[in-house]
Image (tube, helix red, strand yellow):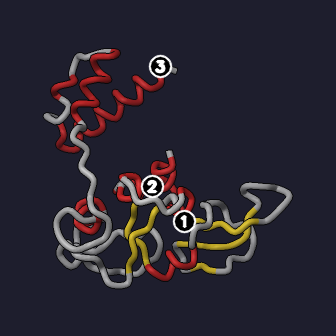
């Protein structure tokens, strides 16, 4: 198991260096075991947590400009095929900030996890409302909502003996949600 995690971190470091991050990890090169763990911990400190929502620098939407802006200035929307453009660092009309793990699952607590950009995606407001706080799964029955990207409907994904309501992302976005859940 230790070899798996060490291999994972090595691949992650190599992968990031291919994207212009070659100097970022220089301080951890050649380190092993506890020295590597400590150096990686120090590398990511201090933790920067954006304020939830809002306009301007330091808020969620300013983070989305970095993480979810397409080369043409449009928003990467994993919930619909609506094309919307960023408005500087401001919220985008018709979109919500969506928690991939619904915040109701952890008691509507506003903490760092609530504001953590890795758990948040810009989302079409209509699709976000329809998927509600249902778990992600495979819709196996006729969907009650389907906009071509997000489907909501009954599924046997969780219990073979009963149907529950789930939401299912389009195939092109399933990897993004899998990485977030991982």
Vertical placement of residue 34 versus 163, above or below: above
Query: Is residue 70 visible in the rendered structure shown here?
Result: no
The answer to which image quadrant residue 133 occupies is bottom right
- Tally of marks: 3
Residue lying furthest right: 161
Residue 22: % across, % down: 17, 35
Q: Are marks 1 and 2 in contact (CB under 8 Å)?
A: yes
Vertical placement of residue 172 versus 48, above or below: below
Decide if residue 177 is on the left or right side of residue 26: right
Decide if residue 152 is on the left or right side of residue 9: right
Mark closest to the chain's N terminus, 2 or 3 = 3
Decide if residue 63 is on the left or right side of residue 136: left
Residue 47: % across, % down: 25, 44
Mark closest to the chain's N terminus, 1 or 2 = 1
Pointer 3: what residue?
A: 2
Write the residue at 26% across / 79% down: 85
Tell me the tag on residue 169.
Answer: 1
Looking at the rendered structure, the secondary structure element under dot 1 is strand
Mark closest to the chain's N terminus, 1 or 3 = 3
Vertical placement of residue 14 versus 165, above or below: above
């Amino acid at each position: 198991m230790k070899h798996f995690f060490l291999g994972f971190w090595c691949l992650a470091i190599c992968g990031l260096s291919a994207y212009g991050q070659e100097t970022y990890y220089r301080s951890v090169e050649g380190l092993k075991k506890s020295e590597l763990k400590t150096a990686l911990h120090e590398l990511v400190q201090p933790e920067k947590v954006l304020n939830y929502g809002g306009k301007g620098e330091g808020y969620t939407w300013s983070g989305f400009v970095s993480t979810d802006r397409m080369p043409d200035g449009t928003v990467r929307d994993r919930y619909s095929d609506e094309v919307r453009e960023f408005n500087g660092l401001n919220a985008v009309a018709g979109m919500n900030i969506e928690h991939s793990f619904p915040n109701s699952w952890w008691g509507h607590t506003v903490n760092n996890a609530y504001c953590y950009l890795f758990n948040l995606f810009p989302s079409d407001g209509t699709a976000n409302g329809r998927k509600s706080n249902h778990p992600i799964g495979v819709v196996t029955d006729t969907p009650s909502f389907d906009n071509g990207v997000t489907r909501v409907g009954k599924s046997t994904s969780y219990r073979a003996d009963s149907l529950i309501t789930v939401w299912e992302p389009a195939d092109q976005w399933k990897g993004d949600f899998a990485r977030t859940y991982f």
